[in-house]
Amino acid sequence: MSEQDAGDCGSLRDWLSAAADAGRGLHGRGASVALRDLACATSLGGRLAELAGRAILVATGDQLTAALALIELDGVARRLVLCPPDIAPEHLPAVIADAEIDAVVTSDAASCGGVALHAVCRPLLAPLTHALPERRSTEWILFTSGTTGAPKMVVHTRAGLTAAIKRRAVHDGPVVWGTFYDIRRYGGLQIFFRAVIDGGSLVLSDADEPVADHLARLGRHGATHVSGTPSHWRRALMSGAARAMAPRYVRLSGEIADQAILDNLKAVYPQARIGHAYASTEAGVGFEVDDGRAGFPATMLGRLPSGVEMKVENGTLRIRSSRTALHYVGAGAPALADRDGFVDTGDMIEVRDGRCFFVGRANGVINVGGLKVHPEEVEAVINRHPDVRMSLVRARKSPITGAVVVADVVLRDTAAPAAEVEGEILRLCRAGLTRHKVPSAIRFVPALAVAATGKLARHHA
């Protein structure tokens, strides 16, 4: 099937009806549902007719019920708004108003935001007793990552969201997807679609589950394809339980995949293909690289065979394709793309020796006496040290230069004495970075905070 076939299908439920397999399922932490059963059943208590044509806020407490609701409501609802679990309650009224919500689906009896029409989704399937509502086109609305204050929302079509998915006619054995992402975020939603459309199962994460327990669960379910941000993967490697699973494919996205994390994953999973993908909530899926190297070939700039067009302008990557979001939600929302249809991703690019490297976010630059420093560029150097698990570079105020660069570093359990490692890190930085980018101080910490998006928690993000 072609890339467009996935988007052309009438609904996600139709995919289950057309390609149901007894072994396929959605596996939450405490329950599982066979996808074959969902093809002719409901988890919404017979409420589909009431929900038809509605703008629905999917605000379930767990990912399994969210997944069930999305499968049932695609092609039935006019609009689906995927509410991530970390949204602040004070922002819900604005979300409901801006998205014109007139129905809410939750996983318990408690209503949400005072919306009159409320349905409950549970992983207890009942046979469909009425004909399905007439199929319609459903808008999918996602919250942008890295939002501070009132969240921004973007509108996608399912055709755009699934355009990068190629359904394979024959699998090399069963495909079991696992992801550290929440499926209510763009990165996790992509894996959810791949599992449903590409004929696999999906092991869902749980925000309260220890990393080691999640890895063990992925292993028990025989996860073959696992996705997460570089920060997710660094935490997995730090857990001591990374070898509880043996995936055939390891996928990174959402943050810069530096050479250190790619090399470390290959060492732990030598049998796996290691790929890193570029995607964002606004720009959609751009490309995937699986040559084991950080960055991507400069020859990919221009128009790719997939139809995605990329260019670098004013230092940032710009993307135009059928996979991008349509627009932001709400009155007075800014334009999502420029007049030529290109989305400015805000990710800074440098071209060196025929390869494009991500160096950081345009809004995350540290200004040291008028000289720019991208924290991610410094982190990539620090992470090369064999005793370093992960690092976070940030600014510290300085009365002389306005700011200086400092680094918080997590070491391996087997690391050499801290003073020795600190000296080696500084030597690495002095050899690979210009003087103003070298950290003025290094602090060793037991862990670094990771946001709900799976990315390192940064003050500017």
Image: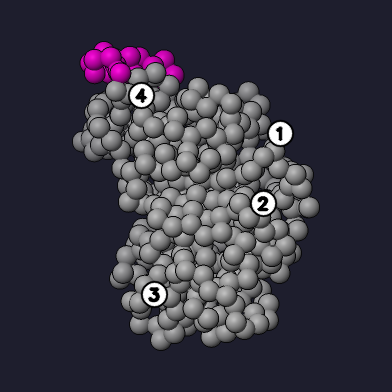
Q: Nearer the viewer, mark 1 or mark 2?
A: 2
Label 4 and label 2: CA atoms lie apart by: 37 Å
* Residue in the image at 24% along x and 27% along y: 444
Any part of residue 281 in sight: no
Q: Which mark is residue 299?
A: 1
Q: Label 4: which residue?
A: 388
* Residue in the image at 53% along x and 81% along y: 46
Any part of residue 180 in sight: yes
Query: Which sits earlier in the primary sequence, circle 1 or circle 3?
Result: 3
CB contact under 8 Å: marks 3 and 4: no
Q: Label 2: which residue?
A: 198
Q: Is residue 268 above or below residue 4?
A: above
Query: Which sits earlier in the primary sequence, circle 1 or circle 2?
Result: 2
Q: Amino acid at mark 3?
A: Ala
Tag 4 secondary structure: strand
Question: Residue 25 vs residue 390: left or right?
Answer: right
Q: Is residue 417 magenta?
A: yes
Label 1 and label 2: CA atoms lie apart by: 29 Å
Q: What range is drawn magenta here?
A: 414-434
